[in-house]
Amino acid sequence: MAKTIKEREEGVFLPLAPMEYIPVGQVGEEAIAVHWQEEELIQPKEEFIRQANMTDVGIYERFSEENYPECFKEYADMLSWDRYWTQILDASNPPFFKWFVGGKLNACYNCVDRHLEKYGNKAAIIFAPEPEDEPYQFITYKELYRRVNEFAALLLDMGVKENDVVTFHMPMVAELPISMLACARIGAIHSEVFGGFSGKSVAERADDAESKVLITMDSYYRSGKVIDHKARADESVNQCKETKIEKVLIWERYPGKYSSSTPLVEGRDYLINDLLENYRGRRVKPLSKPAEDVLFLMYTSGTTARPKGCQHSIGGYLSYVAGTSKYLFDIHPEDTYWCLADIGWITGHSYIVYGPLSIAATSVIFEGTPTYPDAGRSWRIAEDLEVNIFHTSPTMIRMIRKEGPDEPDKYDYHFKLMCTVGEAIEPEVWRWYYDKVGKGEAAIIDTWWQTENGGVIGSNLPALRAMRPGSCGIGMPGIYPVIFDEQGNEIEKGSGKAGNICIKRPWPGSFQTIWKDPDRYVETYYSKYSKVGSKDYRDYCYFAGDGAVQAADGCFRILGRIDDVINVAGHRLGAKEIESSSGTNEEVAESAVVAKKDAIKGTVVDLYVALKPGFEPSEELEAKIRNKVGTDIGPIARPSRVHIVPDMPKTRSGKIMRRVLAAISNKESVGDVTSLANPEIVEVIKNQVQGQRESVLV
Ligand code: WTA
């Protein structure tokens, strides 16, 4: 018999302890959310609970440590296997974990073919173009099947083979999931680079992945402008150092009408839409692949200048995103689900493409920005398409609120569930999301996870647990988070102390390794709190790189990155990547990046620069350095401010004290600086930076 909410609550929630947060000790990202007040609980509505996919509180017991790892069979059984697996987890070579060993499957088959019989005429993807006078494109599962097959056949003829890595540099269009699924169908590995990244960023990733084929698009719309995207492809090909991109396959925004000012390079560039004429009706059998083969790479920023290629498996990844799409995002085939994230990031891979399509969802893809041409744009789409699950990031919510706080009232849409991801959400912003966007009807899930994790690892299942603004909730079923202090002691829940959040046991969605760099994988994630060398997998604990506190009821509040990674508008940027780009200016001697709090983007980048002798500071030079970062990495990485300072604050051993610079940027106390090699510089920098006008250049 179904339990009432009250009954369900008992045993799940404990009385709240007063919170007295103690920051990890740095004035960086992780200190941002620690001062928030503990919020009250809000119950999901009965209407939501009545229709939810997961209403059995017993799931937490089923996925408890006693039932680990067998519990994950429940997710694997949501997929269709060509050959059923024989071993759920092979942990004999930790921390390299293998899931569903012996099993064979195809990800494209699972996301497309198997839905044809029941849902063939239902929309799999709805493409919402940015120009409002262009019609929505409804792509049914049958149509998706046709298009994926034809493109898969084309890829085979282009010489793409099993396990080749194909690099993508695609904007938010339906052709992106079509290309991903076509690769998956033939057993090739895709590596999509966020469309807003520069040609150079694409080249670095294509080099690392040894890609010979690049898939891109001629142009797309963004905030009313037509972006000439093909130009980036030429930059990418020219800047590859180790690999030669032999073929550039170009989708056309308007098939048959090439829309880019860059000429096609004979013998290298191919217009996909032209070639597809020869593939009409072609079918390609989905290749049956071992569960542990690679589905895709997703590069992400780390603590060095070189991005890390997170390598995701087929069987484990797809099981995990299918399971979480069903139980957490509560997607039913009848729902219209819209995730505003970009497919160029992990959220889009897992929760626009693979997760939703694996469970026969209707997934909306929007080309543009939610505030263009006005802040009502998102709500018009929601109304038109009868979207009932809406997923976005705190930055988007802050932006939409700023531009149109009352816009949602004007539109007739109703969400049953809303999701947020990528950054901590301020309770006050959460409330606006709940009251205005969700009209007080929709449940909210705050989902914590990372590129490395494949799917959400910290959140409350929406029909089973109450919401608490600003807190992501507990570990997802089968995920056992723990917080350690610097010495490796476990921090008790309810103690009010912050520490480093880690995950005790591996899970199927987790990445397998860093592409071609297993040592960096072990070093980055499994050296701090693991006994490297042990053969017992229980001696390995995944270090996430986030600070967190845990309330007495078990709910986690994620405080932000504790390493040299900065989260700008929910996008991960490596401080070192930006610093090394800055250092390529001939005038620059030293660079230091810090995170500065921002009302809309959560954090923005402040870049401190010291010049080589003989060069003088100037506004032009600041602009030059700033723009160089934008060209090297992409516009999102452009610092909000460049501060040219006479010298950097340094320790006696010569280390730049970013902590001091961060305190200055955020107008916080710099603390005791007497032990620095040059304490007098702190006051000079402080006067310079805090005396400047408070404008943020974007
Ligand atoms: C941050 C995005 C607070 C966190 C899926 C993490 C969050 C980084 C949340 C990963 C959340 C993600 N609350 N912080 N709900 N979700 N983060 O790899 O610092 O782009 O380490 O993956 O975003 O960013 P990534």
Image (cartoon, helix red, strand yellow):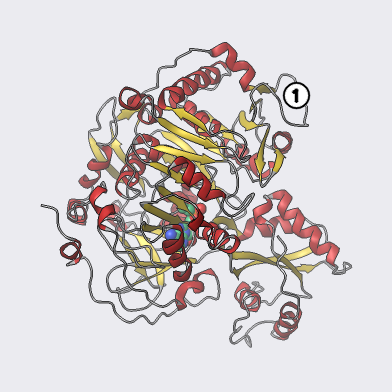
Mark 1 packing: few (<14 Cα in 10 Å), some, or many (20+)?
Answer: few
Residue 55 at x, y = what percent? 21, 52
Q: How many marks are shown on the rendered structure?
A: 1
Relative horizontal placement of residue 647, taking residue 359 as reference (left or right): right
Q: Quadrant of residue 323?
A: top left
Label 1 secondary element: loop
Quarter of the image where the C terminus is located: bottom right
Q: Residue at x 68, y 52 (%)?
A: 635
Q: Residue at x 40, y 17 (%)?
A: 285
Is label 1 within 8 A of ligand 1 (CB to nearest ligand atom)?
no
Is residue 186 visible to the viewer in this orientation of the structure? no
In the displayed image of the protein, which residue is found farthest to the left?
Answer: 1
Residue 575 at x, y = what percent? 62, 61
Q: Residue 194 or 487: which is nearer the viewer?
A: 194
Is residue 552 visible to the viewer in this orientation of the structure? yes
Taking 175 as reference, is 344 above or below it? Answer: below
Amino acid type, residue under disc 1 in the picture: Val
Q: Quadrant of residue 74?
A: top left
Q: Residue 520 or 200: which is nearer the viewer?
A: 200
Q: Residue 446 or 505: which is nearer the viewer?
A: 446
Relative horizontal placement of residue 495, taking residue 249 as reference (left or right): left
Residue 661 at x, y = what percent? 65, 75
| Residue marked by disc 1 | 265
Residue 616 at x, y = what percent? 87, 69
